[in-house]
Image (cartoon, helix red, strand yellow):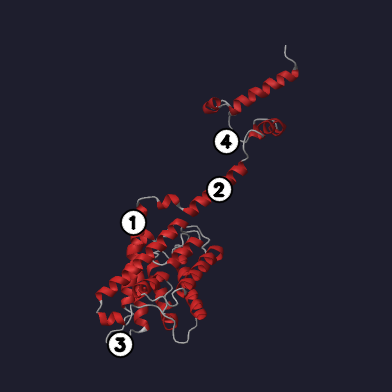
Amino acid sequence: MPRPNERNSYLNLWREFLVFNTAVKKFGLNRHPGKPSGMNVSTVFPEGYVENERVQRHATSLPKEEEGGFDMERYQRVKEFIGLEEVTKLDFLVMLFAEILGTFLLVLIGCASCITWLDIPPTVLHIAFTFGLAVASLAHVLGPISGCHVNPAVTLGLMVSGNCSFLKTVSYVICQCCGAIAGSAVLKLIIPRAQAASGLGATMLGHGVSVSQGIVMEAIITFLLVLVVHAVTDAKRSDTRGWAPLAIGLTIAAAHMAAVPITGSSMNPARTLGPAVVEDEYQNVWVYWVGPLVGGCLAGGVYRMGLRAKQDDEGSYDF
């Protein structure tokens, strides 16, 4: 006849079988009548048993949930930041084509408004609304496909705020630069040679404007643009749905009205690179890379840290 302590040991083994055996769990043999199936283990075992026997026995053999969860979370974050799965999909080629096409049309149409015809220079208002309306129109067409960034500063700002992966950012910037160069090349082919000699709408610093002043101005107007892009495409905001193309277009128009006399109002490194490559004129081109990229990164960081919407809502960062 077993001793009392052996009976307690058998009882504990039987209880452990009822709790942990999968077949018993499947048929619900370990459930107490009138109690829910997902009850805590302390309702089955005495309180001291779980702490002293089961936990000690399995602590060394099973990995800790905190450590495993932390490693998996860090792996997922790195994976999302790199974005390898996204860029290897066939649909990503369509997105790249959309960025090439969008930047091609933007530079072609926008820079065409900057050309002087019959010794009559275009007005600031003319240039501002040409670029603003061009971006607004392209956003309606290409927004659902690629997001219609058409601007390396916008793409970089979205990467800083966590809305664009690293590989997608690099691919977008390369395609945007190629589209801008192609747009300037086509513009040079379709306008008379005499007009092409006067320039293809290249951005230049205004009279008496220093390099540092130009960088600051480009950073400010790009900061405004990227902030607006984040705000009107925020997934948690419902008050801006449907207004993204118009809001971004008006922001570009306003920035041009303010900055055309100072820097030519690029706020887009690809827009400056296109005419510079076709005309083989690179004076102060770096200004239009440093200023917009700094402004875009600051806007992405500021919006991510303190300006993003708090109320949950449905939406997409694509237009």
Asked which secondary structure carries label 3, the reply is: loop
Identity, as a three-letter code, of the amino acid under mark 1:
Val
Q: Which residue in the structure is indicated by mark 1?
A: 94
Q: Which residue in the structure is indicated by mark 2?
A: 73
Q: Are marks 3 and 1 in contact (CB under 8 Å)?
A: no
Please state which of the two labelled residues, at mark 1 or mark 2, is closer to the viewer.
1
Please state which of the two labelled residues, at mark 2 or mark 4, is closer to the viewer.
2
First in sequence: mark 4 vs mark 3? 4
Identity, as a three-letter code, of the amino acid under mark 2:
Glu
User: From the viewer's perspective, is residue 28 above or below residue 233?
Assistant: above
Q: Are marks 2 and 4 in contact (CB under 8 Å)?
A: no
Identity, as a three-letter code, of the amino acid under mark 3:
Ile
User: From the viewer's perspective, is residue 148 above or below residue 26?
Assistant: below
Q: Which residue in the structure is indicated by mark 3?
A: 120
For the question of whether residue 315 can be seen, the reply is: no
Query: Residue 118 location in percent, x, y?
Result: 27, 87
**Alpha-carbon span between mark 3 and mark 2:** 60 Å
First in sequence: mark 1 vs mark 2? 2
Asked which secondary structure carries label 2, the reply is: helix
Identify the residue at image location x=43%, y=57%: 168
Query: Residue 259 location in percent, x, y?
Result: 44, 80
**Alpha-carbon span between mark 4 and mark 3:** 80 Å
Q: Which residue in the structure is indicated by mark 4?
A: 38
